[in-house]
Image (tube, rainbow, N blue to C red):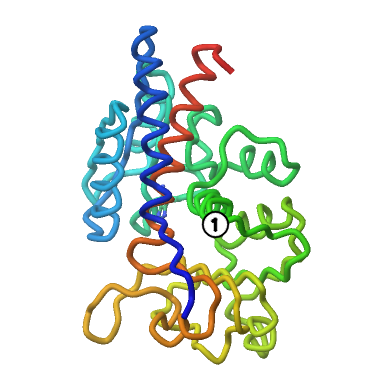
């Protein structure tokens, strides 16, 4: 039976550290502010945004929500981002994805000031990550690295397999594992013989968005299994991309859903927002 990687516990520690840092900044007269933009009424996005706002509140970060209707135009959204780029009390801007189809995500991301891009989604920030010289790391991959560190799991020399190649998770995840000297393979929906790769993985990251896609027989005995999925099973119950019940009998370590990767994403967002504020105040 695998050791359960308790992302919730690790995130609580990180959030507590952030809260202490924000308190110390406040005592010196420095505030920290995050703007969260949500367009339309995607229920999953609403849940994520509510959780992010709640976490900000608990950490002492001022969060401003901008909830825009589905009918919002590019011009309106870009005008809001421009206003927030210039707003002194706001140090981080997060536009929850996905956006409604008629809005151009690339253009929206590009409009956010690089110094306020706490998701690290912009081309500049992605480039910084590629060369290993960055202020912000993308929240989910960085959160995963933090979980590995907390359990003394080191990617160096390990076969690391990332299933999924999204800009938000798969690609930056591969980059961070590579930076820590893992030997990294990125698999995706067109990979032929996926199980031949996953069965060879010492560290397996599943980020495909398909419920219980990774079965126990695709996992190497004793492997570290990281589940980024936030899916619904056939009964509508929250589950991950990994068939957890069977996989935990094969894996050495495994993240649960919920309570694994999800809470770490938010903890990293808080850290990034504090970093953004400290840069503005000339404290780093
Ligand atoms: N949608 C899913 N994950 C994320 C995230 O980390 N940031 C934003 N902005 N949108 C998301």
Q: From the viewer's perspective, tell me whether residue 220 is left or right of residue 14.
A: right
x and y percentages locating residue 175 in the rendered image: 68, 54
Residue 160's image quarter? bottom right
Between residue 283 and residue 231, name the one nearer to us. Answer: 283
Q: Position of residue 139 (x, y in %)?
A: 49, 47
Q: Residue at x 51, y 48 (%)?
A: 106
Horizontal side of residue 107 vs 128, given as left or right: left
Viewport quadrant of the C terminus: top right
- Rate crowding at label 1 as few (under 14), some (14 to 19) or many (20 or more) other CA atoms within 10 Å: few
Name the residue located 65 percent from the left edge and 35 percent from the top edge.
134
The one of 280 and 7 positioned closer to us in this rendering: 7
Check the image and report above or below for 225 versus 143: below
Q: Is residue 9 left or right of 185 when viewed as pictured?
A: left
Image coordinates of residue 91 in percent, x first then y, are 42, 24
Q: Secondary structure at mark 1?
A: loop
Disc 1 within 8 angstroms of ligand 1 (CB): no
Residue that sits furthest to the top in the current view: 28
Q: Position of residue 233 (x, y in %)?
A: 30, 82
Q: Which residue is nearer to you in this view: 255 or 172?
A: 255
In the image, residue 106 sits, relative to residue 148, either above or below, namely above
Query: Which residue is painted at 25% across and 59% down in the image?
Result: 42
Residue identifier under label 1? 151
Residue at 51%, 88% (x, y): give it.
Answer: 216
Q: Would you place residue 254 above or below residue 120 in this image?
A: below
Number of numbered markers: 1
Query: Of residues 109 and 1, which is closer to you in this image?
Result: 1
């Amino acid at each position: 039976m695998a050791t359960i990687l308790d992302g919730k516990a690790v995130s609580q520690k990180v959030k507590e550290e952030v809260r202490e840092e924000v308190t110390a900044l406040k005592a010196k007269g420095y505030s920290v502010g995050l703007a969260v933009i949500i367009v339309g009424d995607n229920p999953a996005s609403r849940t994520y945004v509510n959780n992010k706002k709640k976490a900000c509140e608990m950490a002492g970060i001022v969060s401003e929500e901008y909830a825009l209707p589905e009918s919002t135009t590019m011009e309106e959204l870009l005008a809001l981002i421009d206003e927030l780029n210039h707003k002194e009390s706001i140090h981080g801007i997060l536009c929850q994805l996905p956006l409604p189809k008629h809005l151009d995500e690339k253009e929206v991301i590009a409009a956010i000031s690089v110094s306020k891009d706490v998701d690290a989604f912009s081309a500049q920030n992605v480039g910084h990550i590629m060369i290993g010289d960055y202020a912000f790391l993308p929240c989910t991959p960085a959160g995963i690295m933090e979980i590995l560190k907390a359990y003394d799991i080191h990617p160096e020399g390990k076969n690391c397999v990332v299933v999924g190649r999204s800009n938000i998770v798969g690609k930056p995840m591969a980059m961070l594992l590579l930076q820590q000297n893992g030997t990294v393979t990125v698999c995706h929906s067109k990979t032929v013989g996926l199980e031949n790769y996953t069965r060879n993985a010492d560290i397996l990251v599943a980020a495909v968005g398909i419920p219980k896609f990774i079965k126990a027989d695709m996992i190497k005995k004793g492997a570290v299994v990281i589940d980024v999925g936030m899916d619904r099973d056939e009964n509508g119950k929250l589950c991950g991309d990994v068939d957890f019940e069977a996989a935990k009998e094969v894996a050495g370590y495994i993240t649960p859903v919920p309570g694994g990767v999800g809470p770490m994403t938010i903890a990293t967002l808080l850290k990034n927002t504090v970093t953004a504020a400290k840069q503005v105040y000339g404290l780093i």
